Image (spheres, rainbow, N blue to C red):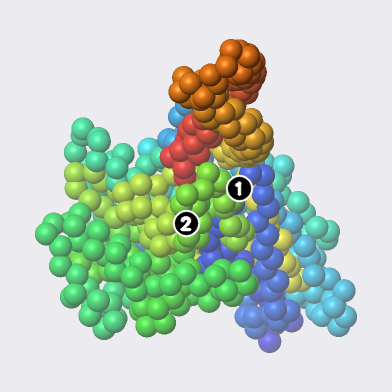
C-alpha cells in the first residue's frame, strides 16, 4: 500500500445572508454576518476542479470577464429631481478570511496546516432597466472574474493562509426604479428569452409539486397572466405573516414554500419562494432574486401618521433581501416584492429604486448552494467575517429632506405658540373695547332721550361722551395694530404649514 499522504478537504459553505431575513437600511450602514465552520474534516480527498470548464445545467459555461472592463472613469451624479426613480450608490463589501489555528492536536494533522482557500463571491453587474455598474475595484486582485447566466462572480485562490486576509470590493452603481408600472410603459414587446422554460421547473425550496402548492394553485384563477400574478401576490400576502423574530435572529433555516404556507409565516425568502412556486405551478415563468437594498421596508403602520406631519423613521433589521420576478408578456421579466408589499413598503405595481441585484439563482452551485459568497478550503478550517457598507445618494437626500421637515415642523410649532399667545393677549383688549362701546351707546341713548334736561347736566354728559369716544378710538387703533400683528403671524403660520405639508408629501412620494 502506498505511503502517500492524503490531504483531506473540508468544504465550507458560507452562512446564507439572504435566508436570515430582509434588510431595512438607511444611510451609511453595516450588515454583519459571520460564518464559522465545524472543525471536522471529510475523510476523503476531493480533487480541485476548473470551474471555467464546467457546464452548469440551464446556465452554460462561465464566461471570463477582463478586470480592465470593470474599471471606468465615467462620472455619474445624483439628480434630486429624479429621486423617485434613480439612486447613485457606493457599495463596499468586506470579507475577512481567517485560519482557525491553535486547536491543539489538529494542528499536527494534514488538515491542521495553513489552509488553501478558494473563495467565491457575487459582485453586481449591469442589468438593463435595473442597475448600471460604473466600476468595481478590489483590494486583493481576484484570480478570476466570470459571468454565468445573469450573475457575476469574483473568485480568489488563496494559498497558505497563515493570517487574516481582508478582501474589500467596492462598486459604484446607478439604480433605477423598475416595476410593473414602469414596465407597462415600454413600447416594445419582449420576446421569450432563451432558457425561459427553465423557470418553470421544480426546484429545491420552490415545492411546486407539493400537494400544498398544488392545492393553493388550484384556488387561484385569473383572467389572464397578469391577473393571475396579481392573485398569487395577494395570496402570498394573505397567507404569510412576516416573522420579525426570525429576521432579527441568526436562524438561517429555509422553510421552503410549502412549509411557509403551512406555518403561515416567513421572511423575505419564504415570501419569494411562495410567489415563485405558485407562478410556476400556474405555468408562468418566475425566478428568485437576491441582493441588498439601500433602504428598508417600513413595517405595517409606520410612515407619516394620519393627521400628523411627521414621518416615522424606517425600522432596520440589518439583513439582505430576496424578491422575485415573473415573465409577463409583453413586458418581459417584471420584479415584485411580496415581502415589502406585506409591510406596506411596496405595492404590487410600484417599487422604489433601492434594489442592488446580485443573483437570480435560488440554489447556486457556484457558491455551494449558499447566498452572496461561498468557499472551499484544504488544511486547517477557516471562517469568514462579512460586512457591507452602503452610501446611498438618494438615502442622504431623504435624510436631508427629513431633517428639513423636522426643522420646519419646529418652526411651525413655535409660530403656533406665538399665534396662540397673540390671540390670548388680544382678548382682554377686545373685551375692554366691547364694554366701552356699550357704555358709549348707553350714554348716547341717555343724551338723546332727554335724560339730561338741564344745560349743565347735558353739557357734562356730552363732554363725557366725547371723552369716551376718543378713548374708544385710541383703544381700537391699538387693538387693530395687535390684530395686524396676529394676522401677520397667522399668515406666516399658514405659509409654514403649507411648506411642511409640501415637504411631507414630497417625502411620502419617494417612499
Category of crowding for the residue at label 1, using alpha-carbon neighbours closer than 10 angstroms: few (below 14), some (14–19), many (at least 20): many
Label 1 residue SS: loop
Q: Which residue is mark 2?
A: 290
Q: Residue at x 19, y 75 (%)?
A: 219
Near-viewer residue (96 or 455): 455
- Residue 34 x/y as whole percent: 69, 65
- In the rendered image, the quadrant that contains the N terminus is bottom right
Residue 465 position by quadrant: top right
- Residue 444 x/y as whole percent: 51, 21
Q: Is residue 325 left or right of residue 35?
A: left
Near-viewer residue (463 or 472): 463
Q: Residue at x 20, y 54 (%)?
A: 226
Q: Residue at x 31, y 49 (%)?
A: 349
Category of crowding for the residue at label 2, using alpha-carbon neighbours closer than 10 angstroms: few (below 14), some (14–19), many (at least 20): many
- Of mark 2 and mark 1, the one earlier in the sequence is 1
Q: Residue at x 26, y 46 (%)?
A: 332
Alpha-carbon span between mark 2 and mark 1: 19 Å
**Residue 193 makes an appearance in the image:** yes
Q: Is residue 212 left or right of residue 155?
A: left
Near-viewer residue (311 or 443): 443
- Residue 123 x/y as whole percent: 55, 47
Q: Which residue is mark 1?
A: 26
Q: Is residue 111 left or right of residue 171?
A: right
Q: Is residue 74 left or right of residue 255?
A: right
Res 219 label: none
Of badges 2 and 1, nearer the viewer stands 1
Amino acid at each position: 500500500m502506498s505511503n502517500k499522504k492524503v490531504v483531506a478537504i473540508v468544504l465550507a459553505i458560507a452562512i446564507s445572508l439572504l435566508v436570515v431575513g430582509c434588510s431595512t437600511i438607511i444611510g451609511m450602514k453595516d450588515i454583519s454576518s459571520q460564518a464559522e465552520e465545524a472543525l471536522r474534516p471529510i475523510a476523503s480527498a476531493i480533487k480541485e476542479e476548473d470551474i471555467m470548464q464546467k457546464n452548469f445545467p440551464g446556465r452554460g459555461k462561465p464566461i471570463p470577464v477582463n478586470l480592465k472592463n470593470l474599471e471606468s472613469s465615467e462620472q455619474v451624479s445624483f439628480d434630486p429631481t429624479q429621486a423617485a426613480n434613480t439612486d447613485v450608490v457606493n457599495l463596499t463589501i468586506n470579507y475577512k478570511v481567517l485560519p482557525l489555528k491553535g486547536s491543539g492536536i489538529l494542528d499536527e494533522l494534514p488538515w491542521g496546516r495553513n489552509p488553501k482557500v478558494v473563495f467565491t463571491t457575487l459582485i453586481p453587474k449591469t442589468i438593463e432597466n435595473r442597475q448600471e455598474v460604473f466600476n468595481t475595484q478590489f483590494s486583493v486582485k481576484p484570480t478570476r472574474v466570470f459571468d454565468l447566466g445573469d450573475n457575476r462572480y469574483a473568485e480568489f485562490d488563496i494559498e497558505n493562509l497563515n493570517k487574516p486576509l481582508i478582501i474589500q470590493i467596492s462598486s459604484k452603481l446607478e439604480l433605477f426604479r423598475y416595476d410593473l408600472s414602469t414596465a407597462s410603459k415600454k413600447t416594445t414587446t419582449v420576446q421569450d428569452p432563451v432558457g425561459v422554460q427553465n423557470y418553470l421547473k421544480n426546484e429545491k425550496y420552490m415545492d411546486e409539486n407539493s400537494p400544498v402548492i398544488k392545492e393553493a394553485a388550484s384556488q387561484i384563477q385569473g383572467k389572464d397572466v397578469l391577473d393571475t400574478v396579481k392573485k398569487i401576490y395577494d395570496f402570498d400576502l394573505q397567507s404569510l405573516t412576516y416573522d420579525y423574530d426570525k429576521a432579527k435572529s441568526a436562524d438561517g433555516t429555509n422553510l421552503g414554500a410549502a412549509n411557509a404556507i403551512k406555518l403561515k409565516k416567513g421572511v423575505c425568502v419564504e415570501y419569494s419562494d411562495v410567489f415563485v412556486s405558485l407562478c410556476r405551478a400556474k405555468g408562468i415563468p418566475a425566478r428568485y432574486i437576491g441582493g441588498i437594498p439601500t433602504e428598508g421596508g417600513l413595517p405595517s403602520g409606520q410612515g407619516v401618521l394620519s393627521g400628523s406631519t411627521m414621518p416615522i423613521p424606517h425600522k432596520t433589521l440589518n439583513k439582505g433581501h430576496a424578491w422575485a420576478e415573473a415573465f409577463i408578456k409583453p413586458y418581459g421579466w417584471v420584479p415584485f416584492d411580496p415581502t415589502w408589499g406585506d409591510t406596506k413598503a411596496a405595492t404590487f405595481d410600484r417599487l422604489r429604486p433601492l434594489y442592488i441585484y446580485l443573483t437570480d439563482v435560488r440554489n447556486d452551485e457556484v457558491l455551494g448552494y449558499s447566498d452572496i459568497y461561498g468557499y472551499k478550503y484544504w488544511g486547517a478550517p477557516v471562517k469568514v467575517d462579512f460586512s457591507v457598507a452602503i452610501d446611498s445618494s438618494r438615502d442622504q437626500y431623504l435624510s436631508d429632506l427629513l431633517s428639513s421637515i423636522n426643522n420646519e415642523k419646529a418652526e411651525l410649532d413655535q409660530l403656533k405658540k406665538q399665534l396662540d399667545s397673540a390671540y390670548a393677549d388680544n382678548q382682554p383688549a377686545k373685551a375692554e373695547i366691547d364694554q366701552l362701546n356699550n357704555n358709549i351707546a348707553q350714554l348716547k341713548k341717555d343724551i338723546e332721550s332727554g335724560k339730561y334736561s338741564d344745560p349743565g347736566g347735558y353739557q357734562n354728559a356730552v363732554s363725557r361722551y366725547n371723552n369716551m369716544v376718543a378713548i374708544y378710538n385710541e383703544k381700537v387703533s391699538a387693538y387693530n395694530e395687535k390684530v395686524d400683528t396676529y394676522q401677520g403671524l397667522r399668515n406666516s403660520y399658514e405659509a409654514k404649514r403649507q411648506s411642511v405639508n409640501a415637504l411631507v408629501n414630497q417625502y411620502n412620494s419617494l417612499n
